[in-house]
Amino acid sequence: MVNSIGTAIGRDYSTITAWEAATEGDLVSMDVISKGECYNDSQFKEHPTISGSITDNNHYVWLTTGSGESHIGIAATGVTLTKTMSGPILTINDKYTRLENLEVFDATSQMVQIFGEKCLLNRLILHDVFEGTILNISLGGSGTEVRNCIIYNGNNAGIRANDDAICKNVTVYNLRTNGVGFHVQGATLTVINCMATNSTTKAFGAFGQGSFSAESKNNLSDDDSAPGPNSLHFVSASDLFKSIVQDQEDFHLKSGSPAINAGVNLSNEFMDDIDGQLRSTFWDIGADEFIASKIPGVPQLLSPANNAIDLPPEITFSWNILPNAEWYHLQVSEESNFNTIFFEDSLITQTKKTVGSLPLRKTFYWRVRGLNSLGVGSWSSVRSFTTTEVLLEPPILVSPKDKEINLPPEVTFTWEKVEGALKYHLQLSEDREFTTLIFNDSLITNLEIQFGPLELGKKYYWRVRAGRINYMGPWSEIRSFTVTPVILLSPVLIAPQNGSTNISPTVTFSWQTVEGAQKYRLQVARDSTFNFNSLVFENGNIKSTEKKVGPFARGQKHFWRVRAETNSVKGPWSDIWSFTTGTVTIVDSLNDKPVEYALYPNYPNPFNEMTVITYSIPYFDTITMKIYDLNGREIKTLVQGAKNPGTYRIRWDGRNNQGNQVSSGVYFCRMQTKKFKMTRKILFVK
């Protein structure tokens, strides 16, 4: 419902005596005739925290309630609040209370006292208190905000802030005995677009360690006390009106618009000639032009997702923007009915809020609603989430060591296990800030990963963090290393001797150590070309200088060679030696199966249409073979399942799991079983 109170500047508030009934959730506007016409009799009652004398049977206090919040108004039949009241007219103790659209005059003491935190006073007109009255509005609860109010013909202080508060668009005029327009003592008061004139002591005064905040701005006074940038001080009222109309639109004085309380003779001291007319006028910084608006709608929750699990103890909640919302109200509870509140904030001005120190292994519920000066919108749907079971520690890096040099272009990164981790995230960069990532994989399930080739002579930085389903722990330390080329010599072969015959089908190959080698590659073929069709065995991850291989075919000549390698550098091949196996026996033929796991080089390589990948397994085992790109992303699953012992071949046509042709470049074929894993580089050229 559109609120009809104060729809335009110039409304004569002296004629407003009560508010009419409305639909539930809206503010009430004009002319309540009797209690029976209110929308909910049970809500039409005195608020228990409002004190003061409301003795006339025709006066009522209405209340609409929500969780942690109230709307308060005064309903009457044909009269306003008058001097029949004694003591403070309204004392509000509840936090988050709103008091709106009310005129109070002829009071004998304080008009409004606020002790509740984060209350809102909006569109109040307070005037003509009896001489000797102490205060007009007293603010004793932190975080209270006063908006769009007019206070005139009062005493002592227009606004008295004893706790931190905010005033926006508030006008204080003609304070009598010891008058201070805006009085702050022992607290911090923020004043924006506020005016104070004709105060007998000071327009804006700070006392007893009180102060006006650095956010104060655009204020106006008839002395030199208006705080903040863009504030004005003036002497001549006539000159003031002209300058504001012409140059200071922010103060909302508009030529030709009738003032609030037009026709009421507030004072003969200020005569202005706006539009060529000489008249007594009360200026209206406070009221502004009130544009008809609606109560905010229902927010759509964005993050975290409903029923999310394994979330960290610090979470940022987010939701969509509501066009009519001035701020938002977030509640987080361990109960779905929100009987108890773990966290609450009803003055959020953005569409997100970070909440920390959430206990582990707990399920929470959260919701949001929008608010504005017209009222409170409906709550959003309720979402739930569960926090993680364990806090993850930063991983301890193992290798390469920090500032290590002379590393090969293909580097193996290793780190220690983190308790509770389900995955790891490795980043490799050319800069310490990790703005340019060379490698970025957040789905690593092992404690090591190999990557390369890296550019020779370059310095690199790396770091790792542990993760769970929806939670990533802190990063490890940052380490650096430098890649330097390594010169490898060709190995010297030892056995079997070149040209030897009648060799057992299971052969033990041996060679001399090569300095700087991290591993050795052994090839055995049926001819000395070692091409794909003649190759019968290859292993490029031999860590020692001896390897037992077989069984080979009986009665055939074989050729073998060895080279030393690092993770990125390949040395020259050794000499090519040959041997011939002995004749076949029945017992030997039954044992012709692989004696070790092997992933052979694909052929052809490079390829552009089809390549064949050969692999061997010596036992019944579950095997996974996949193709990955340079960034570690899975491209194609070639094999996944259990296999009997044997040697197998599989073809890859350069297409991904979706059947699309991949782009030209370097790819990696990774074979993995429970006891074996190996990776080979494949070059695809269109």
Image (spheres, grey):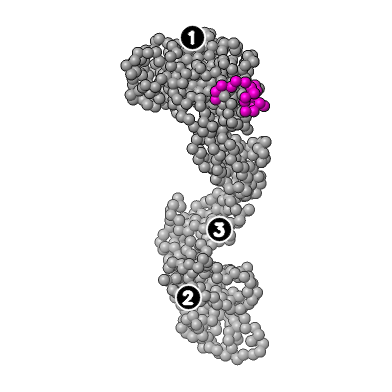
The amino acid type of the residue labelled 3 equals Leu
Give x and y (percent) for residue 650. Answer: 54, 75
Q: Out of 661 and 246, give the one closest to the viewer.
A: 246
* Other-residue count near label 2 (Cα within 10 Å), few / some / many at <14 / 14–19 / ≥20: some
Which type of secondary structure does the marked residue at label 2 adopt? Answer: loop
Query: Where on the picture, by quarter, is residue 362?
Result: top right
Let me know if residue 529 appears in the view. yes
* Other-residue count near label 3 (Cα within 10 Å), few / some / many at <14 / 14–19 / ≥20: some
Look at the image and give the residue range highlighted in magenta. Answer: 29-46
The outermost residue toward the top is 131
In the drawing, what numbered circle is on residue 610? 2
Q: Out of 446 and 60, give the one closest to the viewer.
A: 60
Sequence-wise, which precedes: disc 1 or disc 3? 1
In the drawing, what numbered circle is on residue 127? none
Query: Where on the picture, by quarter, is residue 254?
Result: top left
The amino acid type of the residue labelled 2 equals Met
**Dominant SS type (magenta):** loop
In the drawing, what numbered circle is on residue 177? 1
Sequence-wise, which precedes: disc 1 or disc 2? 1
Residue displayed at 48% across by 75% down: 611
Residue displayed at 57% across by 46% down: 304
Residue displayed at 55% across by 61% down: 448
Q: Out of 617 and 103, give the one closest to the viewer.
A: 103
64 to 639, vertically: above or below = above
Looking at the image, how many numbered discs can be counted on the residues? 3
Residue 201 within the segment the image draws in magenta: no
Q: Nearer the viewer, mark 2 or mark 3?
A: 2
Residue under label 3: 443
Which type of secondary structure does the marked residue at label 1 adopt? Answer: loop
Give x and y (percent) for residue 673. Answer: 61, 69
Mark 2 to mark 3 CA distance (whole Å):
29 Å
Instruction: Verify CB contact (< 8 Å) between mark 1 and mark 2.
Output: no
